[in-house]
Image (cartoon, grey):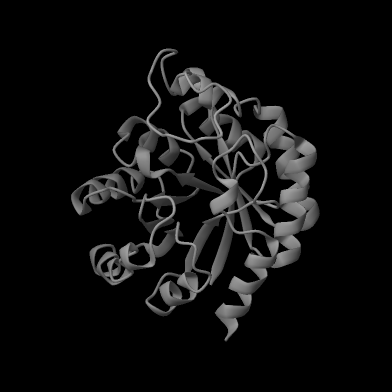
Amino acid sequence: PFFIAEAGVNHLGSLELGEKLIREAAHAGAHAITFQSYKAKNLTTKDAPRFWDWEGEINREGSQFDSYSLLDSFGEDEHLELKKICDKYRIEFMSTPFDNEATDYLDRVGINAYKIASCDVTNHPLLMHVATKGKIVMLSTGASTVEEIREAVQILKKGTDKIVVMHCNLKYPTPDDEINLSMISHLKSEFPDCLIGLSDHTMNLLTPSFAYMLGANICEKHYTVDKTLELSADHWLSVDPNDVREIIKNYST
């Protein structure tokens, strides 16, 4: 099984913290680490209301643009540094682009695999642009219908035959009784030409092993080095390096 530590923007705009995330993930046994590549101006209008409620927001009356702007400082130069650090620690560098600009500079940086967020399964223009790069694409499928997933896969196949369909539940965190791991078997039958994986938002460290037994060869979980960090709502529900070690150990037993 291939395990991915999904750091997202848990670097909090700091390359020093980014290196710590990478180093500790590699030492814990993760095979890859995934970041997120976006700019607030490309995602939302400046007055769009927030679609989440998180008590840690700096500006309680702010917009979705304000939330995204807090952690969107990294551009091509910073991602190139992250790639170099990943090479140093011998862990695969990955990222999730949310627009064509990020897709292009990640390609220049030398990425081998793109992650597509669940929110972009129906973003066909982005899927078509990612497909033109001919790279591995990991497609997260939270809140999608099978038909929407099928359409996304067909678009991606126009440029790449290296597609991973990632079962996902978008409840953060996902209760154990709502993860619906049986969907893995269904995705295997629906997409026999694709690898099947799991984008896991449960708090259970055994979930990746159960998914692997059902045929999910790849698993990712949100990841941080400190669950008490602020600025991002991801930290408290993420796995830390000790959790990653436990997951890797569970795979082998």
Q: Position of residue 65 (x, y in %)?
A: 48, 20
Residue 232, can we see it?
A: yes
**Of the pair 212 and 51, the residue shown nearer to us:** 51
Q: Position of residue 24 (x, y in %)?
A: 75, 57
Q: Quadrant of residue 243?
A: bottom right
Q: Quadrant of the C terminus?
A: bottom right
Up the image or down, 217 lies above or below 12; here it is below
Residue at 55% across / 45% down in the picture?
A: 234
Q: Quadrant of residue 185?
A: bottom left
Count the marks: how many?
Answer: 0
Residue at 24% across / 69% down in the picture?
A: 189
Up the image or down, 70 lies above or below 21; here it is above
Up the image or down, 2 lies above or below 174; here it is below
**Of the pair 215 and 224, the residue shown nearer to us:** 224
Residue 39, can we see it?
A: no
Q: Where is residue 186 in the image (x, y as percent from the top left)?
A: 25, 68
Up the image or down, 42 lies above or below 237; here it is above
Task: Say left or right for 213 vs 146.
Answer: right
Q: Where is residue 194 in the image (x, y as percent from the top left)?
A: 36, 62
In the displayed orientation, state which residue is furthest to the left: 147
Residue at 74% across / 34% down in the picture?
A: 14
